[in-house]
């Protein structure tokens, strides 16, 4: 499944891109006056193979959640249980991602790919008549409902191993998580999603994100590692040392993305790489959130370089590694607000920018049709 997905990822359609550039030149605005939105709309035309490309509606956020053995190294001040507790919050509609998703009209799908603690029952009840989290029967149809977050149970294992001691995952476990991401992309697109947004939840997950970024870009661990949820100086120093030692121990080969994900990654990072590959194979845009998403995007690009044409960088996370990763991918983020929350929040805030970029090609009059004189 991974190999067939990679094989399905094709380069952008140059003629649709040329059509979009030509159309932009005829719309009632000075050439280039929409700045980065113009190139974004051209890229989306190339991805869709059509000018104009489809409006990115409806939108679907997929939040992949996992825990991390490296938590034992003291790389984050937060207890591991917060990962599972936040899943309860997502399903109850009480997290920041839910507020932003309601604003954007996006559905929220939470995917447990490897949470360590049992998922909470109480608050995770979106409907009164249910007694526990809404765990979907794999055979039930996927419905994109912005008012009802849903949980997909797809745990590969209850958290990774400690990457400071051993490989975080076996290759088979990493592959299973990547394939879960591909499956979720397919299900959401089959249910009608016209754009996928990445989300993540995992206490400790900025440490594997930093290790992935250093492994794929060659950046020094000091430049790839940030303060995550807001760690103090001693914790930050420990975190950089953990990333440096892990790279020395595992010597991950950036030409072997499954091996890199297994050695120093996380289950949500692997699943996000799969989601991106799945979206790219279906020529559907994927709006990237923060540092965890862009670390996964590096893995996706290592699997299939043409997957980059499906990626839109939603925002520039405050994590320094995100900027290192975006530079490596050649992507410019749409917004830069100093966010460092995750969950898909930065991607959701960027969604109206993407929609606006495409809407221009659908709705704006040409000089000719509107009778406006050209310069
Ligand atoms: O999206 C980001 O760029 C981002 C930056 C810092 C932290 N986070 C979130 O915070 C958690 C990981 O932080 P930490 O310090 O425990 O590694 C995890 O749940 C992420 O979603 C997310
Ligand atoms: C409370 C909390 C919410 C989060 N959302 C994403 N990562 C998070 C980390 C914490 C600690």
Image (tube, rainbow, N blue to C red):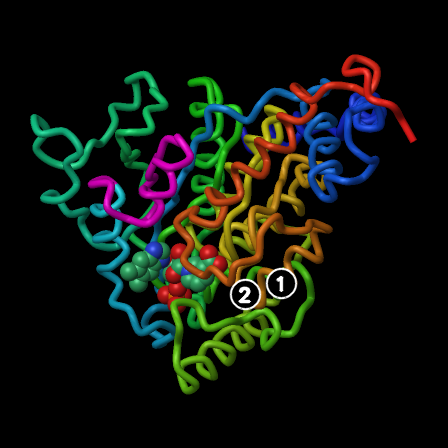
Classify mark 1: helix, strand or loop.
helix
The residue lying furthest to the right in this view is 375
Q: Residue at x 49, y 55 (%)?
A: 292
Q: Quadrant of residue 37?
A: top right
Name the residue carrying label 1: 215
Q: Nearer the viewer, residue 190 or 263?
A: 190
Distance from disc 2 to disc 1, alpha carbons, whole Å, reads: 6 Å
Badge count: 2
Q: Nearer the viewer, residue 183 or 150?
A: 150
The disc label shown at residue 211, or none: 2
Ligand 1, by image quadrant, is bottom left
Ligand 1 has an atom within 8 Å of the beta carbon of the residue at disc 2: no
| Segment tinted magenta in the rendering | 91-114
Residue 55: image x %, image y %?
58, 23
Q: Is residue 102 magenta?
A: yes
Residue 282: image x %, image y %?
59, 24
Classify mark 2: helix, strand or loop.
helix
Instruction: Verify CB contact (< 8 Å) between mark 2 and mark 1.
Output: yes
The disc label shown at residue 117, or none: none
Residue 147: image x %, image y %?
28, 29
Q: Residue at x 72, y 18 (%)?
A: 50
Residue 66 in the figure: left or right of residue 294: left
């Amino acid at each position: 499944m991974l190999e067939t997905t990679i094989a399905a990822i094709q380069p952008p359609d140059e003629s649709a891109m040329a059509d979009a550039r030509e159309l932009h030149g005829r719309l009632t605005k000075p050439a280039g006056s929409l700045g980065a939105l113009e190139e974004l709309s051209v890229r989306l035309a190339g991805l869709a193979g059509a000018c104009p490309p489809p409006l990115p509606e409806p939108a679907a956020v997929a939040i992949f959640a996992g825990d991390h053995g490296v938590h034992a190294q003291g790389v984050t001040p937060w207890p591991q249980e917060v990962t599972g507790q936040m899943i309860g919050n997502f399903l109850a509609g009480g997290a920041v991602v839910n507020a932003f998703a309601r604003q954007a009209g996006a559905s929220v799908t939470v995917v447990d790919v490897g949470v360590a603690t049992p998922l909470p029952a109480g608050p995770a009840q979106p409907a009164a008549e249910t007694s526990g989290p809404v765990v979907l029967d794999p055979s039930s149809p996927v419905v994109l409902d912005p008012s009802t977050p849903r949980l997909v149970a797809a745990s590969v294992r209850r958290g990774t191993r400690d990457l400071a001691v051993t490989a975080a995952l076996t290759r088979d476990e990493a592959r299973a998580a990547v394939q879960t991401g591909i499956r979720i992309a397919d299900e959401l697109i089959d249910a009608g999603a016209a754009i996928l947004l990445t989300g993540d939840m995992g206490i400790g997950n900025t440490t594997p994100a930093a290790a992935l970024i250093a492994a794929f870009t060659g950046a020094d661990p000091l430049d790839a590692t940030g303060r995550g949820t807001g760690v103090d100086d001693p914790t930050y120093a420990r975190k950089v040392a953990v990333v440096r030692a892990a790279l020395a121990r595992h010597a991950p080969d950036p030409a072997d993305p499954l091996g890199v994900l297994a050695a120093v990654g996380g289950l949500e990072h692997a699943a996000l790489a799969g989601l991106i590959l799945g979206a790219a194979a279906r020529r559907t845009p994927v709006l990237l959130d923060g540092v965890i998403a862009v670390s996964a995007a590096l893995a996706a690009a290592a699997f299939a370089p043409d997957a980059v044409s499906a990626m839109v960088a939603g925002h520039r996370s405050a994590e320094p590694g995100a900027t290192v990763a975006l530079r490596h991918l050649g992507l410019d983020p749409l917004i830069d607000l100093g966010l460092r929350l995750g969950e898909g929040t930065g991607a959701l805030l960027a969604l109206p920018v993407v929609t606006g970029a495409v809407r221009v090609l659908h709705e704006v009059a040409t000089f000719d049709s509107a009778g406006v004189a050209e310069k």
